[in-house]
Image: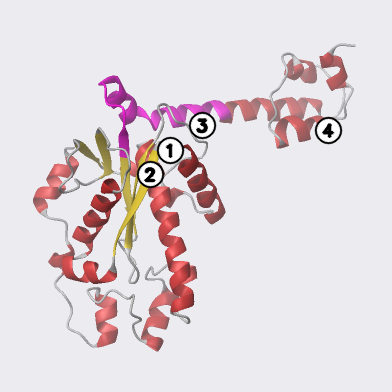
């Protein structure tokens, strides 16, 4: 009896558990044999395996496309390409956190994507774990609430990015950043609009920045109980805004943000103080 015959002697549920649920490699000829098998469910199992193959090919192509900026730079001779992104620009509380990541050449991690596209917190944590293990180097930087209130949130975000890049133990040859340009960065750089959805390096940085900041907000939840920072992470959800009005501002609330200032009875700050400078918008848009 051949190895294929031995497999076909197993029940359809056993084969489904092995080749669909556990996604084990499928021996040559098995799908074709299932398609001619007379057992109930064999044809459906063959379709499930072919669908798994189709999804694998699509994911492989997506991950290849996610490396297009990196591939272009590798072909130009750049070796260490850092992706940089931040998390926490919109929240009413807590620091803004940035991450910088240099991935290995041709790195492909299934389900790698912009952190905002990944709604499952456990999946984000799992991806962050793999990225940290696999990266050539990675680093995080942050700008504290006091710096946000002094500089404004836009420039505080740039400061966090600058600190993340400076924290890399290997100096990058080139930096890819989501939609901006990092000041005082000695390496050449390119700002990519929606870069966290277009570049694997930036997407990886977005995941590390997001998971790092979420962990910080869980810590703040125990330091400042009652605000549920572990749940909303400081973002202006209806629950957070209600608790802010009921409890007043905590030390980690951003005094330069309108909703916090309203609770404190302070005059609003002009919106233009938070705006991205026109010349930097233009620079980021054109790389």
Instruction: State which quadrant residue 39 falls in.
Output: top right
Depth order, front residue of 92/106:
106
> Could you give the CA–CA distance between mark 4 and mark 2, rounded to whole angstroms?
42 Å
Front: mark 1 or 3: 1
Q: Which mark is residue 135?
A: 1
Cβ–Cβ below 8 Å for labels 2 and 3? no
Quadrant of the drawing holding the C terminus: top left
- Does dot 1 land on a helix, a strand or a loop? loop
Q: On the image, numbered disc 4 is attached to which residue?
A: 14
Front: mark 1 or 4: 1
Sooner in the amino-acid sequence: mark 1 or mark 3: 3
**Furthest-top residue in view?**
2
Q: Kindly report the secondary structure that dominates the magenta region of the rendered protein.
A: helix
Quadrant of the drawing holding the N terminus: top right
Q: Position of residue 152 (x, y in %)?
A: 19, 65
Q: Which mark is residue 59?
A: 3
Depth order, front residue of 60/200:
200
């Amino acid at each position: 009896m051949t190895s294929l015959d031995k497999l076909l002697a197993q029940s359809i549920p056993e084969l489904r558990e092995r080749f669909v649920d556990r996604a084990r490699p499928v021996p040559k000829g098995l799908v074709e044999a299932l398609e001619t098998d007379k057992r109930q469910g064999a044809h459906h199992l063959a379709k499930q395996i072919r669908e798994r193959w189709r999804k694998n090919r699509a994911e492989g192509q997506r991950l290849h496309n996610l490396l297009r900026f990196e591939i272009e730079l590798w072909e130009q001779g750049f070796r260490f390409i850092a992706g940089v992104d931040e998390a926490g620009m919109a929240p009413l509380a807590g620091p803004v956190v940035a991450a910088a990541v240099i991935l290995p050449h041709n790195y492909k991690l299934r389900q790698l994507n912009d952190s905002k596209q990944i709604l499952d917190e456990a999946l984000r944590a799992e991806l962050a774990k793999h990225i940290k293990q696999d990266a050539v180097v990675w680093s995080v930087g942050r700008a504290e609430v006091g710096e946000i209130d002094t500089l404004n949130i836009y420039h505080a975000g740039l400061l966090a990015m600058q600190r993340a890049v400076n924290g890399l133990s290997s100096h990058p040859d080139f930096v890819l950043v989501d939609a901006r340009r990092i000041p005082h960065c000695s390496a050449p750089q390119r700002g990519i609009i929606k870069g966290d959805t277009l570049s694997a390096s930036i997407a990886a940085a977005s995941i590390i920045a997001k998971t790092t900041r979420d962990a910080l907000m869980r810590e703040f939840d125990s330091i400042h109980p009652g605000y549920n920072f572990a749940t909303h992470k400081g973002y202006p959800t209806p629950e957070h805004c209600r608790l802010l009005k009921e409890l007043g501002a905590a030390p980690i609330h951003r005094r330069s943000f309108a909703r916090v200032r309203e609770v404190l009875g302070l005059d609003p700050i002009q919106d233009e103080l938070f705006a991205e400078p026109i010349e930097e918008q233009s620079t980021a848009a054109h790389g």
